[in-house]
């Protein structure tokens, strides 16, 4: 998989502005209010949000690459909510393990901010450490631990990450679904799944959810001034907690089985933002 952009040699802010201008031209929508990244298992929610007024291949937009992972559609969609707000749905997530380049990972988030979005809703499929959780259960992200050893920030960019995952937005989500639990998300670099020992390490340092996305995106979103809501779909219990081998097929299956619950829930939450 290739990209014509070497992110080591470009100004990420300028590239995001270029991409945002291309999105405005391609969709006919000059301003978006909310950005929504749909991770594994969450894709059907976009169909329930409102009127899809434009769908464009992400690879037509500067800096975007074709997704490497099954379950990501590779498009950008502009959706008009019933309340008049505009949502940019990002179905073209770049994972850190694809390039080991945090600025590539952050490009979609920075582009969304450049389109005008002030709220970022980020979702993922992940492993659960709490034994009380079951596959197919959605949980709110209350905080994260970044174990990638990377950041999308450069230089002396000191960003406060207190309340990174907005307590205000989590409260709105609980108004829609009071049963939502929450936990701390731990991003590992991947692409291999975590070992049982690594899962126990994540638990020991305060983690409840393990995955390979989200933390780097959230950091970039905070730098861009966006308010962030994070949700994980627990697709399996993490290695050592779950006694059977892990597989991506299991992740996809859990997402499909959970769609009937999580898609309308997420659509309802977004409609309130």
Image: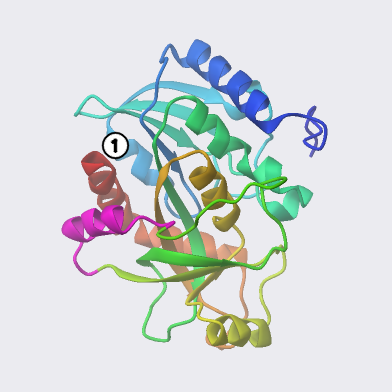
Looking at the rendered structure, the number of numbered marks drawn on it comes to 1
The answer to whether residue 187 is magenta is no
Residue at the image position 68 percent from the left and 47 percent from the top: 156
Residue drawn 27% across the image and 67% down it: 180
Question: Do we see residue 74 in this rendering?
Answer: no
x%, y% of residue 130? 43, 83
Residue 19, x across and y down, in percent? 60, 22
Left or right relative to 95: residue 263? left
Task: Please indicate whether residue 171 sits to the left or right of residue 239 in the image.
Answer: left
Q: Which of 136 and 151 is in front in this view?
A: 151
The C terminus appears in which quarter of the rendering? top left
In the image, residue 23 sits, relative to residue 28, either above or below, namely below
Residue beneath the point at 35% across and 44% down: 45
Q: Main secondary structure of the magenta part?
A: helix
Residue 63 visible, this orientation: yes
Please tell me in which quadrant of the rendered image residue 231 appears: bottom left
**Over which residues does the magenta segment extend?**
164-179
Direction from residue 187 to residue 82 in the image, left or right: left
Nearest the camera: 188 or 196? 188
Q: Is mark 1 on a helix, strand or loop?
A: helix
Residue receiving disc 1: 49
- Answer with left or right where residue 183 lies relative to residue 3: left
Colouring chosen for the image of the structure? rainbow
| Depicted 249 relative to depicted 4: above or below | below
Tell me which residue sits at (41%, 56%) in the image. 230
Above or below — where is 170 with respect to 55?
below
Q: Which of 164 and 57 is in front in this view?
A: 164
Front residue of 206 and 180: 206
Image quarter of the N terminus: top right
Residue 148: quarter of image: bottom right
């Amino acid at each position: 998989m290739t990209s014509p952009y070497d992110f080591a040699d470009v100004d990420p802010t300028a590239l995001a502005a270029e991409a945002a201008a291309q999105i405005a031209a391609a969709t006919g929508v000059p301003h978006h209010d909310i950005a929504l990244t749909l991770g594994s298992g969450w894709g059907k929610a976009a169909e329930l949000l409102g009127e899809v007024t434009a769908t464009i291949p992400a690879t037509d937009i500067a800096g975007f690459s074709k997704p490497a992972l099954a379950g990501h559609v590779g498009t950008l969609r502009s959706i008009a909510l019933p309340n008049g707000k505009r949502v940019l749905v990002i179905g073209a997530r770049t994972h850190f393990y694809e390039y080991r380049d945090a600025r590539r990972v952050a490009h979609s988030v920075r582009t969304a901010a450049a389109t005008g979005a002030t709220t970022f809703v980020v979702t993922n499929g992940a492993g659960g450490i709490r034994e009380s959780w079951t596959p197919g259960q959605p949980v709110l992200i209350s905080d994260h631990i970044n174990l990638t050893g990377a950041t999308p920030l450069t230089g002396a960019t000191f960003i406060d990450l207190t309340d990174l995952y907005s307590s205000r937005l989590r409260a709105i989500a609980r108004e829609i679904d009071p049963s939502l639990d929450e936990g701390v998300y731990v991003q590992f670099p991947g692409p291999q799944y975590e070992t049982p020992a690594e899962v126990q390490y994540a638990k020991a340092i305060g983690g409840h959810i393990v995955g390979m996305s989200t933390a780097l995106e959230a950091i970039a979103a905070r730098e861009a001034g966006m308010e962030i809501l994070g949700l994980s779909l627990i697709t399996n219990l993490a290695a050592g907690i779950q006694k059977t081998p892990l597989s991506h097929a299991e992740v996809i299956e859990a997402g499909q089985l959970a769609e009937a619950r999580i898609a309308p829930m997420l659509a309802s939450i977004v409609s309130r933002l």
